[in-house]
Structures are given as structure tokens and as C-alpha cells.
Image (tube, rainbow, N blue to C red):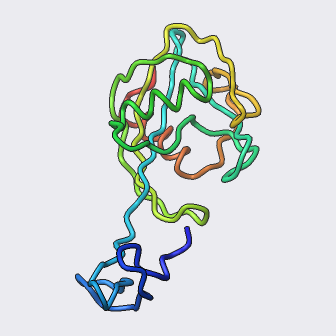
């Protein structure tokens, strides 16, 4: 994400300053401060009725062509669990139910900057998948036959789910 150069409130050029214990951009004219806040993301650790894990192969950057858990950015006015289920449905046409929270994670990524990622365990009764334009493929896999997930955060979520006894 590109940083602000001009104040969105009054249009004057921003300056660097040490505000609230951090270096921040601010407007010397109207005192607006640019607080760089994380973007909220929800991720679905999704299991079918047989206990197989849903993995998707990404069709866009970041992590183009990598195997991952489904998920994406929350939208305005959306609760994290709602965004998790919406992203799951948009990407795979799967309707799920939230079972539990796996964890909340912070990551810095080159493409988007600071992310706050909320991971949920989701179960689906009907595991018929229809992918959208964001994916190359998707499927449910047993632990021994899963494609390799190389995205560090997604590996961490899978590991945390196993450590907490969330997986069958």
C-alpha cells in the first residue's frame, strides 16, 4: 500500500513527526494523523463430514499458484465470522458453519502491508465445490495426501489447529 503524501482532510502536504511514540505522517495544517492500521482478513480452516481439510490453489497474487486455506479481506460492516463464511462461499460455493476460533495473527506482507488475520474452524455438510476466478483448483484432502502448503501463516494455522486438537 502506498503511504499518504497529502492530507485526506484538507489536502496539504503531510510531514513526518514522532506522535504517540511512533514515527507517523501528519498534517501540520489541520493536525490529521495517518495511523497505519492493519487490514482485517478471515481464513477458513474447513473440514468436510469425513474430516478432510479443504485446500485451494490460488489463482492471483499474492502467492499465485500456491496451495492455501480459503479466505480474504473483511468488508465494511461485516463481523469476522461472517466474512470468513462469505469468502469461503465466494471462492468455493461451500456453505459452512463456524465451529471455533483457531487464532488471531498479525503479518506484514509486501503487497498489502499490515494484516490482522482471524482463523476459524469451519465445517461443511455438503462438500460439492464450484470455484470462482480467484482459484485454479480446490479439494478436500486427508492429512497424508494433502498438497504442500508453503505459505507460512497458513502452515501455522494448520499447525495450531492440530496442536489445539481441532482436527479429528
Q: Using the image, determine if residue 30 lies above or below residue 97.
A: below
Judge left or right: residue 52 versus residue 101.
right
Horizontal relation, residue 71 to residue 165: left or right: right
Q: Is residue 156 shown left or right of residue 36?
A: right
Q: Residue at x 68, y 39 (%)?
A: 67
Above or below, 54 against 114 in this view is above
Q: Residue at x 42, y 39 (%)?
A: 119
Q: What is the x, y in percent for residue 44?
A: 48, 32
Relative to 95, 9 lies left or right: left
Quadrant, the N terminus: bottom right
Establish if 19 lies above or below 98. Answer: below
* Whole-percent x, y for residue 76 in the image: 38, 44
Residue toward you, 30 or 90: 30
Q: Which residue occupies the foreground of this view, 145 or 8?
A: 8
Residue ID at (44%, 33%)? 84
**Image location of residue 94, percent across then percent down:** 56, 18
Amino acid at each position: 500500500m502506498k503511504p499518504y503524501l497529502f492530507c485526506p482532510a484538507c489536502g496539504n502536504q503531510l510531514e513526518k513527526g514522532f506522535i504517540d511514540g511512533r514515527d507517523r505522517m501528519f498534517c501540520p495544517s489541520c493536525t490529521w494523523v495517518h495511523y497505519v492500521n492493519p487490514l482485517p482478513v478471515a481464513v477458513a480452516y474447513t473440514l468436510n463430514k469425513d474430516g478432510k481439510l479443504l485446500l485451494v490453489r490460488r489463482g492471483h497474487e499474492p502467492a499465485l499458484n500456491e496451495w492455501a486455506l480459503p479466505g480474504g479481506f473483511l468488508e465494511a460492516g461485516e463481523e469476522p465470522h461472517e466474512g470468513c463464511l462469505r469468502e469461503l462461499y465466494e471462492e468455493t460455493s461451500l456453505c459452512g458453519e463456524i465451529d471455533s476460533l483457531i487464532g488471531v495473527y498479525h503479518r506484514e506482507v509486501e503487497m498489502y502491508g499490515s494484516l490482522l488475520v482471524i482463523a476459524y474452524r469451519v465445517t461443511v455438510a455438503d462438500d460439492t465445490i464450484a470455484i470462482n476466478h480467484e482459484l485454479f483448483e480446490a479439494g478436500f484432502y486427508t492429512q497424508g495426501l494433502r498438497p504442500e502448503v508453503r505459505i507460512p501463516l497458513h502452515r501455522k494455522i494448520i499447525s495450531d489447529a492440530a496442536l489445539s486438537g481441532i482436527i479429528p
